[in-house]
Every structure is written in structure tokens, then in C-alpha cells.
Amino acid sequence: MMAPSVFQRTKSPRSSPGNLPRKLQNGTESASQSEPTADSSPGNSISDAENFECYGEADGDTPINTLENGSRSPANPLNRHSWTRTSLRRTPPSHQENLPHRRWGSMRHSGKRQIGSNVLASQLYRSSSFNSSGCGSGGEPADDMYSDVSLEEDVQGLNYKVQLLQQQVTSLADTQSTADDRYARVKADKAVLQARVHMLEEQFREMESRCEERIAEEQRRHREAIARVERDRDAQLAALADRLAAAENEASDLKQEVGRLRGVAETLRANSEMATRAQREAQEAVGELTAALASAREAERRERAACIALRAQLAAAQRDLDARDTAPPPPDPDPRLDELREELALLRNQNRSLCEAQEELQAQLLTRGVEAGRSLLHASSPLLEHSLAHELSQMTDHELQKALKEQQDVNVQLRAYIDGILLSIVENYPQLLEVKYQKPEEKS
């Protein structure tokens, strides 16, 4: 890495050293901030493109801002002595050979080539000899050369640049001392950090050993837990296998029970159909008996009306007899009275026979109902293949409850049907349901 150039671009060699900035950055003085004001004198021989080195020619490829970078980073150990190696070298003679012959005051170059201190000294020597001899290198007159004033200005510029170089050398020395201090501090910090690193490594090894022990303990505990879980799983699998076998046996038993219940259901369905037919026949018989009862009641009503009429006639006849008893002896009895008495006795006999027939019919209905119930409970009816008691003994409680519920539903429907019939009878023929109590007959 090449050292930065110690000279910066200047606009006037006559700038006083008091214009230089005194502020240093990081222990060094920044030479890049010192830019003297330009002089308006025509004898200004230093252009903006000229750069100078201490005791040698500056490198043309080195950038201008490298001094700032070097002064702002004093901790870089590669830049401490590089300026001495680059500034003390000699200018190659090729620069002097390629330099054209021109006047001393014309030191402004059109290109970016820089003039070294050796070239400048040789030119100053030639110019002083030319001034003493009265002609230039090309035989020009003495009035074309620089005057003493311009030479003094050049000398002042060189003095100013020498002072600037001294200041830069001082700044570089300060920078080197600061860099040494920083290097010592960094070395001490490095020792502290190395000790801390060793301590952290020890802690890391301890933590690693503890973690390994903990991992081993966790692995042992996990293995025990896995073994326990496997034992529990095996026990659960065995229990589930037993339950599965029991469930399969129960399923086979349930299949057999379903077959048996289907047979029972078919039997109950047949019994229900037969009971429905018997109920229908009973309803038809009840209808017939109701019609017969209605006709008997109508006949009884007519007989009662006739009896009432006869009773009135008898009362009238009794009154006539009483009147006759108090009166003179009656004439011969009327033959119609005997006929009426015979007819009254006949009507009484008929009424008695009708009452007996009604009682017999009611007894027959009750007997038929009792026989039907017994036939349901015992195998006495030829219509049933099995008795109801035997079927009930073979049925479970759930089946009995279900059959009883169905029978109750059927009874409710039958009761609703009978209530509808009775309601229609009450609305249309209320006289069929009238119950008349016969008064005790008066003794004649």
C-alpha cells in the first residue's frame, strides 16, 4: 500500500502559514483543509495541478484524498513508515529527459504530470544562471525571464511548502504515537478478551458436561416411560381383545335372539290380526244387540204408554166403582172391563218377559267377554295356536311393555271409535240411550 502524498493542491505560494488550520482530527492535523487563497499576481508560477513531495517526486497514480484517509485512520500499522519510503526516492532521469525546454515561469502543465523537487531545483539553477548571463537557453533576452519579485515569490512558496511538510511530519509523528497507544490498548483488550474467552470456554465445557448428563438422565427417563407405556398398551390391547370376544359372543346371541323375536313378532302379528277380527265381530254383535236393545226399548216404551193408558182407565174404572159403591147397586158388569183387565195382565206378562230377555242378553254379553278373556289367557280357544300366558312368559319386559303400549294404542283408537258412535247416537237418536225406571205397580 503506497503512502499518501504529503503535498496538496495549492492556489498561491504566498499564503501565510497563519492560514493553516490548527485543528487536528484523531491526534493529527488535516492537511487537506488548508487551501490558501489564490494570488492575482501574473507571476504566480504554481498552478492548481502541481503536487509536491518531500525530497522526491510524487506518484501520479496516488489519489489526492489518501492523506485524509491516512490521517483519519492512524491505527492502521501499514501506513506508519510508508511515507518515508516513497518520499525519499530519486526522480528517474526519464522525467528530466521528457521535460521540454520552456521558460521558468511556465510551470503549468496541461496534463496531470507532476514536477519533482529535483527537477524544480535544476530549473531554478538554470534560471539563476540565465539571469546572471543575460540570456535564456534559447538565446532569448533577459527581460523575458522572471524578475526577482517572481523568484522571491517562488522562494516564499517553497518555504511555505517546507513548513507545511514539517507540520505534516509532526502530524504523522503524533499519529504514530496515537497508533502506538491504540495498539497498546488493543493489545491489553486482546489479553482481557483472551482471558474471557478461556473462561467462557471453561464454562462452555462445564455446561456441555452438565447438558450431556441431563440428556442421559432424560433419555433414561424417557426409556422408562416408553417401557411403561408399552406395558400399558399391551394390557389395554389384551383387555380390548377380551371385550371384542365378549362383544362377538353377545352379537351372536343377539342374532339368535333377533330370530326368536322375529318369530314372536310374527306370532303376535297373527294374534293381533285374529284379535282384530274378533273385535270386529264383537263390534258387529254389539251393533246387532244395540239394534235389538233399541227395538226392545221402543216396544217397552209403547207397552209403558199402553200401561199408562190402561192405568188411567183402571183409575177411572176404580173411581166409577167407588161411585157405584156409594150409589145404588150398579147394573150388570160391563164386558169391556173384563177384556181390559185381561189385556192389562197380558201386557204385564209381555213386559216381564222382555225384561228377562234383556237381562239374559246382558248376561250373554258378559259371559262372551269373560270367555274371550279366558281364551286369550288359556289355550281353550281353537283360534289360537298358543295361549297368551305362554307367550307372555317367553317375552322380556321390554317386549311386554312394547306390546302393551301397542295394545293401549289400539284400545285408545277403539275407544275413540266407540265414543264417536255414541256421540252420533246421542246427536241423532238420543231416545236409544234413555234409561227409564219403572214405578212399582199399584195393586188394583
Image (cartoon, rainbow, N blue to C red):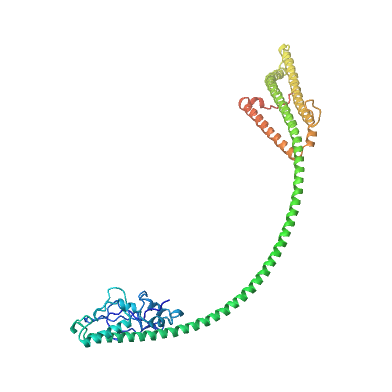
Q: Is residue 4 visible?
A: yes
Relative placement, left or right, of 422 versus 81 is: right
Snapshot quadrant of residue 367: top right
Query: Of residues 266 and 3, which is closer to you in this image?
Result: 3
379 in relation to 10, above or below: above
Q: Is residue 438 visible?
A: no
Snapshot quadrant of residue 218: bottom right
Which residue does the image show at 66% across and 72% down from the upper left?
A: 209
x%, y% of residue 348?
A: 74, 19
Which residue does the image show at 55% across and 79% down from the upper left?
A: 193
x%, y% of residue 424?
A: 62, 27
Relative placement, left or right, of 265 versus 126 is: right
Location of the C terminus by quadrant is top right
x%, y% of residue 253?
A: 77, 40
x%, y% of residue 37?
A: 27, 81
Snapshot quadrant of residue 147: bottom left
Location of the N terminus by quadrant is bottom left
Relative placement, left or right, of 276 versus 122 is: right
Query: Of residues 315 and 280, which is closer to you in this image?
Result: 280
Query: Of residues 367 and 127, which is closer to you in this image?
Result: 127
